[in-house]
């Protein structure tokens, strides 16, 4: 029996119309849909994909627990267990489409599992998609960068010192996944005298657009994206 193939599939930031034609084809053809979640109904990537491919409801779904913690040892154990379950499906000759929000190569949950499966000698392919910062810039009707302007992508969910140093970089700073740190992140932006705009839940139900730091609530959600630059 031929072994199956793992596909890391990008479903974009929220709008199902931003899913690529290739991603749609792969999801339709795969025998198994893998989700980095414990519940398909609560998995945002699945809900986005299902709007574009309703037949996903009839496919075999592999739920993989991916705890949102920063304990490296616990994360490594979780990732290896998830990768092993994917390999079991591949050994049965089933192609697996592992769904992820945004793009598979940008702060993607999918990547951890995909890398391990490939290291175990299995065949795989990454299907690129629209990253949240590109969709966010389009929603804000602005260029993400132009001319010689630089772009810096910064994870804002970790050390606030990292954010503070990142804000000193030239050009446009994209701050992703500020989540619980939003209040502190907003304070750093204001102290630095920088201009900011952003989108929360871009392309999803409940989308909000921010055109200034004052408009950003301290409790802005996990799916928030900020674009920061000099005034």
Image (cartoon, rainbow, N blue to C red):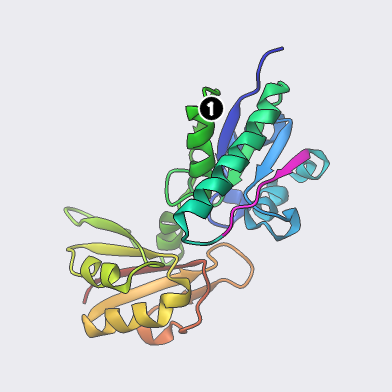
Q: Residue at x 42, y 76 (%)?
A: 181
Q: Residue 124: x percent and y percent?
A: 53, 27
In front of the other: 211 or 89: 89
Q: Does residue 194 show up magenta in the picture?
A: no
Which stretch appears magenta? 60-67
Q: Residue 178: x percent and y percent?
A: 42, 70
In front of the other: 105 or 170: 105
In the picture, the quarter occupied by the N terminus is: top right
Q: Is residue 48 left or right of residue 190?
A: right
**Residue that sits furthest to the front in the current view:** 73
What residue is disc 1 on?
124
Q: Residue 175: x percent and y percent?
A: 36, 65
Q: Residue at x 27, y 84 (%)?
A: 190
Does residue 43 sit above or below 92 in this rendering?
below
> In terms of secondary structure, where does tag 1 sit?
strand
Q: Is residue 209 left or right of residue 36?
A: left
In the picture, the quarter occupied by the C terminus is: bottom left
- Number of numbered discs overlaid on the protein picture: 1
In front of the other: 209 or 10: 10
Residue 187 in sight from this viewpoint: yes
Residue 210 in sight from this viewpoint: no
């Amino acid at each position: 029996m031929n072994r199956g193939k793992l596909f890391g599939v990008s479903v974009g930031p929220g709008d199902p119309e931003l899913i690529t034609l290739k991603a749609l084809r792969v999801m339709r053809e795969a025998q198994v849909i893998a989700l980095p979640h414990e519940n398909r109904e609560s998995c945002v990537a699945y809900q986005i994909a299902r709007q574009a491919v309703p037949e996903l409801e009839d496919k075999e779904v592999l739920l993989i627990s991916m705890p949102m913690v920063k304990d490296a040892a616990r994360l490594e154990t979780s990732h290896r267990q998830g990768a092993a379950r994917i390999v079991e499906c591949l050994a049965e000759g089933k192609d697996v489409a592992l769904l992820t929000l945004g793009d598979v190569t940008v702060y993607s949950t999918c990547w951890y599992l995909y890398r391990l499966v490939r290291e175990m000698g299995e065949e795989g392919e990454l299907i690129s998609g629209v990253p949240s910062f590109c969709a966010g810039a389009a929603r804000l009707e602005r260029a993400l960068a132009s001319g010689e302007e630089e772009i810096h992508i910064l994870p804002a969910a970790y050390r606030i010192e990292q954010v503070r140093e990142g804000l000193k970089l030239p050009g446009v700073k994209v701050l992703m996944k500020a989540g619980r740190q939003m209040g502190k992140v907003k304070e750093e932006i204001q102290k630095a005298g920088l201009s900011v705009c952003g989108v929360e839940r871009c392309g999803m139900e409940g989308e909000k657009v921010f055109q200034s730091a004052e408009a950003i609530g301290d409790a802005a959600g996990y799916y928030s994206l900020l674009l920061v630059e000099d005034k």
